[in-house]
Image (cartoon, helix red, strand yellow):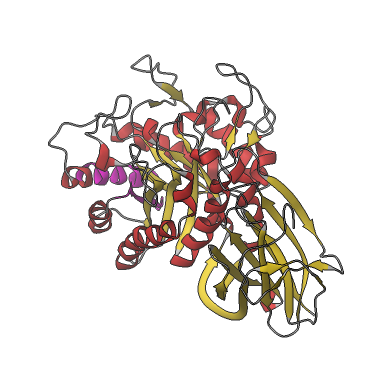
Amino acid sequence: MPGNEATGKLAVLEITKAGMNARFEADNIGLSFESTVLADPRLDPESSNLEVLLKSLGSPALRFGGNELDRRVFWTSSGEKPKRSDQVMVTPDDFKRLKKRVDITGSTVTMGIPLGDYDPARGADMVVHAVDILGESLVGVAIGSEPNGYTIEGVPNGAVRDSDWTKAKYVSQLEAYTKRIHSKRPGVPIIGPDVYDAAWMEAFADSSVRHKAAISQHWYQLYECDSDKVPGRGPEAQNLVSPAAQNDAKKILGIGKGKADAANLPLWLEETGPTSCPGTNDTSLTNASVLWAADYTLHAATIGVERLAMHSMLGACTGGAPMSLVCDPADHGTKSNTFQGRPHLAAMRLLVPSTGGTFTNTSVKGGGNMSAYTVTKDGGNTLVTTIINANDAAESGGNPVTLDLPDGFTVDGASQVYGPSNEAKNATSVIPFNPLPDKIRYSSPSKSGNATPSASSNPDNSELKIDIAASSVTVFIMRNN
C-alpha cells in the first residue's frame, strides 16, 4: 500500500459467485466526441498516438454527437462549401479515416446526424455513407443531439428552433429523417432521443420510427455550475465522492432504464461525465474524478446501462475541457500528434479486466466511504473485484480490508491507481498488475475500531487480509484453482 499507515476503519468484503444478471461489456467503457472531431486528421491512426490510448481501454465504444452536431457540422459528399464560416465540413473521407481507427481498436460506433438545419435528404446521405463505410461497426444512428435544448441560448449558436418547438414537432422531424434513411438503407438502427428528459424518451419510444435500437440518455454528475454546496450537485471534488453521488446516479439512470424497459429497448448512456460545467472548472482534474469514474461506470452497468461514453475532446490539456479523458499537451492554440490521458482515463483502464463478466453479489461492511463490485468470467473460473476507497488519503493512509472469497479461489494479482488525496490535481499514480507478495501488509484493528500496524500473510485460500490505500481504486483478479 502506498503512502502512510492504514489508520482507517476495518472493512469486510464478502465476494460471492451468485449472479445479478447485469453484465459489463466492452461498450460499457467508451468516449463521446463532438462531431466536429470527425474532420480532425489526427483520427487517422497514422497521424497520432490516439489509438494507443483507445486500445488501453480495450475496444471502447465511440460516439460522435454533442452540441456542435446541430450547430456547426456541415455534411457533404459532393464538395459543397459550408453555408456559414463557423461550420466544419465533414465528408466521406472523414468516415474512411474513422474506419481505419475502428478496425484497429475493434470499437463500435454511434453516429449523430445534424437536425439543427432541417434537411432530411442531406441527413440520409450522411447515413448512407456512414453505413457503407463503417459497416457492422456502426451500431446506432441518432437524429440530432439533445433536441429538448434546441431553444436554449446558453451555448454558441444555441437556439436552432423557435420558442414553439415541442416534442411533437421533434417526433415529426425525426420520423421524416428516418423514413428517408430507411428508404435508402433499410434496417439502419436508430437510437434516441439523446436527452436527459424522460418525457422526450417517451416521445421517441412512442414514435413510428422503425428499427429502434436503444433509448439514449445523457447525464452529468455535477451540473449546478454556480453552486458550491457540499454535499450537492455543484462542481466540487467532494461531491464526486459523496455517497449522494451514487444515489443520484441510481435515481436518474433508473429513470432512463425504466423508459427503456417500457419500450423493450436497451439503455445507452451516450454522453456523460463528471461535470458539464465550463472548462474553467478543474474538478475533473482531481483524483476524485478517478474514484468517481470507476464507481459510476460499474454502478451504471449494474443498473442496466449497456453502453456508456464519457464526453471527451481532442483539445489542449491546458485550457481545454477538463472532463475529457484525453487531451493534447501542446501549448494552447497549437496542436500536436501526441495525446495523453487525463486522470480518470487511468481508472477506466483498470475496468478492462471486468469486460465480458457478469456481476455477482458483493457486500461491503464497514470501512467508511468504500464500494466494491465483482464480475465472474470464464465459466465461473475467474472473479474480478474492483474496490473504490474514497476515504481521503489526506486524512488516512488507508483501510485494513478482509476479502472473503468463494471456496477454491485465490488472488492471482492486483493493480491500483491512487493519489495523495481526493482533491489532488493531476497527481494520480498507477501500480500495474502484479502478483501479490508472500507477505502482505495488514493493519490489525484495535478495540477502538482503528488500525494498528502489523504484518500478515494470507492465512488461507478463502480469505485475504490486506491494507487498501485511501483515495484509490484497486482491482483484484482471482482464479478458481
Residue 61 shows in this picture: no
Give the left or right position of residue 274, taking residue 457 as reference.
left
Locate residue 415, reporting x and y percent.
Answer: 73, 57
Which span is picked out in magenta?
Answer: 172-196
Q: In the orientation shown, which residue stands out farthest toward the left?
A: 164
Q: Nearer the viewer, residue 399 or 336?
A: 399
Locate residue 117, reporting x and y percent.
Answer: 28, 29
Where, by quadrant of the figure, is residue 465 drawn?
bottom right
Locate residue 181, reporting x and y percent.
Answer: 35, 43
Quadrant of the drawing holding the N terminus: bottom right
Where, by quadrant of the figure, is residue 150 drawn?
top left
Give the left or right position of residue 314, taking residue 452 as reference.
left
Q: In the orientation shown, which residue stands out farthest toward the right?
A: 438
**Above or below for 117 versus 251:** above
Q: In the orientation shown, which residue stands out farthest toward the bottom?
A: 407
- Is residue 113 part of the magenta span, yes or no? no
Quadrant of the drawing holding the C terminus: bottom right
Q: Nearer the viewer, residue 119 or 88?
A: 88
**Above or below for 71 versus 475:** above
Where, by quadrant of the figure, is residue 42 drawn?
top right
**Above or below for 432 versus 379:** above
Q: In the orientation shown, which residue stands out farthest toward the front?
A: 448
Q: Nearer the viewer, residue 311 or 397?
A: 397
Residue 410 shows in this picture: yes
**Above or below for 379 versus 194:** below
Identified at 40% across, 39% down, the residue is: 276
Identified at 52% across, 33% down, the residue is: 313
Locate residue 172, reporting x and y percent.
Answer: 20, 45
Identified at 48% across, 55% down, the residue is: 307
